[in-house]
Amino acid sequence: GGFYKEIKDLIFWAGLGSIIDASEYGLPETESGKTISKMVNNKYIAEIYGIELEWQTHFWYLPGLLKGLVLNINYTYTFSETKYPRTEIKTEYLNRPPWVSTTNIDTFYTDRLLNQPNNILNVTLGYDYKDFSTRISLLYQDDIFKRANFWERHRGTSEEYIRWDISVKQKLPIEGLELLANFNNISASIERDINIGTGYPMREQHYGFTADVGIRYRIK
Protein backbone atom coordinates (compact mmCIF):
# COMPACT_ATOMS: atom_id res chain seq x y z
CA GLY A 1 0.00 0.00 0.00
CA GLY A 2 0.90 3.65 -0.21
CA PHE A 3 1.35 6.15 2.61
CA TYR A 4 1.86 9.88 3.19
CA LYS A 5 3.13 11.61 6.33
CA GLU A 6 3.94 15.14 7.44
CA ILE A 7 6.47 16.08 10.12
CA LYS A 8 6.38 19.46 11.83
CA ASP A 9 9.08 21.18 13.91
CA LEU A 10 11.86 18.79 12.86
CA ILE A 11 14.98 19.41 14.98
CA PHE A 12 18.19 19.66 12.97
CA TRP A 13 21.53 21.46 12.79
CA ALA A 14 21.07 24.67 10.82
CA GLY A 15 24.73 25.54 10.43
CA LEU A 16 26.61 28.62 11.61
CA GLY A 17 25.37 32.17 12.04
CA SER A 18 26.77 35.46 13.24
CA ILE A 19 25.49 36.86 16.56
CA ILE A 20 24.29 40.37 15.77
CA ASP A 21 21.94 40.88 18.73
CA ALA A 22 23.22 38.70 21.59
CA SER A 23 19.98 39.17 23.57
CA GLU A 24 18.13 37.08 20.95
CA TYR A 25 20.13 34.08 22.17
CA GLY A 26 20.03 34.96 25.86
CA LEU A 27 23.72 35.89 25.80
CA PRO A 28 25.58 38.93 27.16
CA GLU A 29 26.35 41.77 24.77
CA THR A 30 30.04 40.83 24.84
CA GLU A 31 29.18 37.80 22.65
CA SER A 32 28.00 39.98 19.75
CA GLY A 33 29.96 39.46 16.56
CA LYS A 34 30.84 35.86 17.36
CA THR A 35 29.76 32.80 15.39
CA ILE A 36 27.11 30.45 16.79
CA SER A 37 26.21 26.86 15.89
CA LYS A 38 22.44 26.57 15.69
CA MET A 39 20.06 23.68 16.44
CA VAL A 40 16.58 24.69 15.34
CA ASN A 41 13.04 23.44 14.86
CA ASN A 42 12.40 23.52 11.13
CA LYS A 43 9.52 25.89 10.40
CA TYR A 44 8.91 24.10 7.09
CA ILE A 45 6.83 20.91 6.95
CA ALA A 46 8.62 17.72 5.88
CA GLU A 47 6.70 15.40 3.56
CA ILE A 48 7.20 11.62 3.34
CA TYR A 49 5.42 9.36 0.91
CA GLY A 50 6.10 5.92 -0.44
CA ILE A 51 4.97 2.35 -0.92
CA GLU A 52 5.09 -0.68 1.39
CA LEU A 53 4.75 -4.28 0.25
CA GLU A 54 4.41 -7.24 2.61
CA TRP A 55 3.93 -10.97 2.20
CA GLN A 56 3.43 -13.44 5.04
CA THR A 57 2.89 -17.15 4.67
CA HIS A 58 2.91 -20.37 6.67
CA PHE A 59 3.79 -23.41 4.58
CA TRP A 60 1.23 -25.65 6.30
CA TYR A 61 0.45 -27.34 2.99
CA LEU A 62 3.96 -28.80 2.55
CA PRO A 63 4.59 -32.44 3.44
CA GLY A 64 6.14 -33.71 6.66
CA LEU A 65 8.42 -31.47 8.69
CA LEU A 66 8.40 -28.78 5.97
CA LYS A 67 4.94 -27.66 7.09
CA GLY A 68 6.60 -25.85 9.99
CA LEU A 69 8.25 -23.26 7.72
CA VAL A 70 7.11 -19.61 7.90
CA LEU A 71 8.18 -16.65 5.77
CA ASN A 72 7.67 -12.90 6.09
CA ILE A 73 8.90 -10.31 3.57
CA ASN A 74 8.44 -6.55 3.97
CA TYR A 75 9.80 -3.91 1.57
CA THR A 76 9.40 -0.14 1.85
CA TYR A 77 10.49 2.52 -0.63
CA THR A 78 10.16 6.13 0.52
CA PHE A 79 10.37 9.57 -1.03
CA SER A 80 10.83 12.64 1.15
CA GLU A 81 11.28 16.37 0.75
CA THR A 82 11.58 19.38 2.99
CA LYS A 83 13.01 22.89 3.02
CA TYR A 84 16.00 23.57 5.26
CA PRO A 85 16.51 27.11 6.59
CA ARG A 86 19.89 28.56 5.70
CA THR A 87 21.60 31.68 6.97
CA GLU A 88 24.05 33.45 4.69
CA ILE A 89 26.50 35.72 6.49
CA LYS A 90 27.16 38.90 4.50
CA THR A 91 30.18 40.93 5.60
CA GLU A 92 30.85 44.48 4.38
CA TYR A 93 34.01 46.46 5.12
CA LEU A 94 33.33 50.13 5.78
CA ASN A 95 35.52 53.23 5.62
CA ARG A 96 34.19 54.45 8.96
CA PRO A 97 33.50 52.93 12.40
CA PRO A 98 32.57 50.21 13.15
CA TRP A 99 34.60 49.39 9.99
CA VAL A 100 32.85 46.03 9.51
CA SER A 101 29.11 45.39 9.00
CA THR A 102 27.74 41.84 9.32
CA THR A 103 24.25 40.86 8.17
CA ASN A 104 22.44 37.52 8.42
CA ILE A 105 20.39 36.72 5.30
CA ASP A 106 17.74 34.04 5.87
CA THR A 107 16.95 31.73 2.95
CA PHE A 108 16.39 27.98 2.42
CA TYR A 109 17.29 25.00 0.23
CA THR A 110 15.31 21.84 -0.58
CA ASP A 111 16.46 18.27 0.03
CA ARG A 112 15.43 14.90 1.49
CA LEU A 113 14.40 14.39 5.10
CA LEU A 114 17.27 13.63 7.47
CA ASN A 115 17.69 10.02 8.67
CA GLN A 116 15.20 8.80 6.08
CA PRO A 117 16.23 5.70 4.07
CA ASN A 118 15.19 5.16 0.47
CA ASN A 119 15.08 1.37 0.75
CA ILE A 120 14.20 -0.91 3.69
CA LEU A 121 13.88 -4.67 3.33
CA ASN A 122 13.05 -7.09 6.14
CA VAL A 123 13.01 -10.84 5.48
CA THR A 124 12.30 -13.44 8.17
CA LEU A 125 12.49 -17.18 7.62
CA GLY A 126 11.31 -19.31 10.52
CA TYR A 127 10.48 -22.79 11.62
CA ASP A 128 7.96 -23.94 14.24
CA TYR A 129 7.69 -27.49 15.54
CA LYS A 130 5.62 -28.24 18.62
CA ASP A 131 7.17 -26.16 21.44
CA PHE A 132 10.25 -25.17 19.41
CA SER A 133 10.51 -21.97 17.35
CA THR A 134 13.39 -20.30 15.51
CA ARG A 135 13.76 -17.28 13.22
CA ILE A 136 16.56 -15.99 11.01
CA SER A 137 16.12 -12.35 10.00
CA LEU A 138 17.67 -10.12 7.37
CA LEU A 139 17.63 -6.31 7.56
CA TYR A 140 18.69 -4.33 4.48
CA GLN A 141 18.91 -0.52 4.44
CA ASP A 142 20.40 1.77 1.83
CA ASP A 143 20.93 5.47 1.16
CA ILE A 144 19.87 6.99 4.50
CA PHE A 145 20.22 10.79 4.26
CA LYS A 146 22.61 11.70 7.08
CA ARG A 147 23.79 15.27 6.62
CA ALA A 148 21.99 18.25 5.12
CA ASN A 149 24.03 21.03 3.56
CA PHE A 150 23.43 23.73 0.98
CA TRP A 151 26.46 22.47 -0.94
CA GLU A 152 25.78 19.01 -2.33
CA ARG A 153 29.43 17.97 -2.01
CA HIS A 154 29.17 18.37 1.77
CA ARG A 155 26.03 16.25 2.19
CA GLY A 156 26.15 12.79 3.70
CA THR A 157 24.44 9.45 3.13
CA SER A 158 24.77 5.92 4.45
CA GLU A 159 26.34 2.97 2.72
CA GLU A 160 24.44 -0.23 2.06
CA TYR A 161 23.82 -2.04 5.36
CA ILE A 162 22.97 -5.74 5.66
CA ARG A 163 22.42 -7.38 9.05
CA TRP A 164 21.57 -10.96 10.04
CA ASP A 165 19.97 -12.01 13.35
CA ILE A 166 18.89 -15.40 14.72
CA SER A 167 16.45 -16.10 17.56
CA VAL A 168 15.57 -19.45 19.14
CA LYS A 169 12.81 -20.30 21.63
CA GLN A 170 12.01 -23.60 23.33
CA LYS A 171 9.16 -24.09 25.79
CA LEU A 172 10.15 -26.17 28.82
CA PRO A 173 8.06 -28.86 30.55
CA ILE A 174 7.11 -26.40 33.32
CA GLU A 175 4.10 -24.30 32.26
CA GLY A 176 5.06 -20.70 31.42
CA LEU A 177 8.80 -21.42 31.32
CA GLU A 178 10.80 -20.83 28.12
CA LEU A 179 14.44 -21.03 27.10
CA LEU A 180 15.52 -18.12 24.86
CA ALA A 181 18.60 -17.39 22.76
CA ASN A 182 19.27 -14.37 20.53
CA PHE A 183 22.23 -13.92 18.21
CA ASN A 184 22.45 -10.36 16.91
CA ASN A 185 24.42 -9.04 13.94
CA ILE A 186 26.07 -12.40 13.29
CA SER A 187 27.81 -10.92 10.25
CA ALA A 188 29.32 -8.11 12.41
CA SER A 189 28.10 -5.54 9.88
CA ILE A 190 29.37 -1.96 10.15
CA GLU A 191 27.16 1.12 9.89
CA ARG A 192 29.06 3.64 7.77
CA ASP A 193 28.12 7.16 6.61
CA ILE A 194 29.99 8.73 3.71
CA ASN A 195 30.50 12.21 2.30
CA ILE A 196 28.67 12.45 -1.03
CA GLY A 197 31.33 14.72 -2.53
CA THR A 198 34.46 12.77 -1.59
CA GLY A 199 33.15 9.27 -0.92
CA TYR A 200 35.17 9.22 2.32
CA PRO A 201 33.63 7.97 5.60
CA MET A 202 32.14 10.57 7.95
CA ARG A 203 31.15 8.16 10.73
CA GLU A 204 31.37 4.47 11.52
CA GLN A 205 29.59 2.38 14.15
CA HIS A 206 31.08 -1.02 14.99
CA TYR A 207 28.48 -2.89 17.05
CA GLY A 208 29.91 -6.33 16.37
CA PHE A 209 28.27 -9.65 17.13
CA THR A 210 26.32 -10.09 20.38
CA ALA A 211 24.47 -13.01 21.92
CA ASP A 212 22.23 -13.47 24.93
CA VAL A 213 20.70 -16.57 26.45
CA GLY A 214 18.05 -16.64 29.15
CA ILE A 215 15.02 -18.22 30.72
CA ARG A 216 11.65 -16.48 30.70
CA TYR A 217 8.65 -17.26 32.85
CA ARG A 218 5.24 -16.01 31.78
CA ILE A 219 2.75 -15.34 34.57
CA LYS A 220 -0.83 -15.95 33.51
Image (spheres, rainbow, N blue to C red):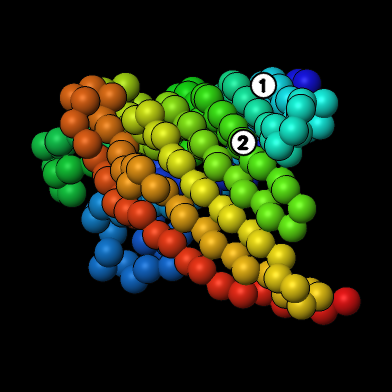
Q: Residue at x 65, y 28 (%)?
A: 73
Q: Residue at x 43, y 68 (%)?
A: 26
Q: Secondary structure at mark 1?
A: strand
Q: Residue at x 88, y 76 (%)?
A: 220
Q: CA distance from mark 1 to mark 2?
A: 25 Å
What residue would you read off at disc 2? Answer: 125
Foreground of the two, 143 or 124? 124
Residue 114 located left or right of residue 175: left
Looking at numbered disc 2 in the image, what kind of residue is underneath it?
Leu
Q: Position of residue 197 (x, y in %)?
A: 23, 22
Up-down: is 191 above or below 78?
below
Which of the two discs, 1 and 2, labels the residue nearer the N terminus? 1
From where the camera sits, is residue 171 visible? yes
Q: Position of residue 89 (x, y in %)?
A: 29, 37
Q: Label 2 neighbourhood size at 10 Å, few (<14), some (14-19), many (20+)?
A: some
Quarter in which the N terminus is drawn: top right
What residue would you read off at disc 1? Answer: 50
Foreground of the two, 214 or 16? 214
Which disc is residue 193 wearing?
none
Looking at numbered disc 1 in the image, what kind of residue is underneath it?
Gly
Q: Residue at x 61, y 37 (%)?
A: 124
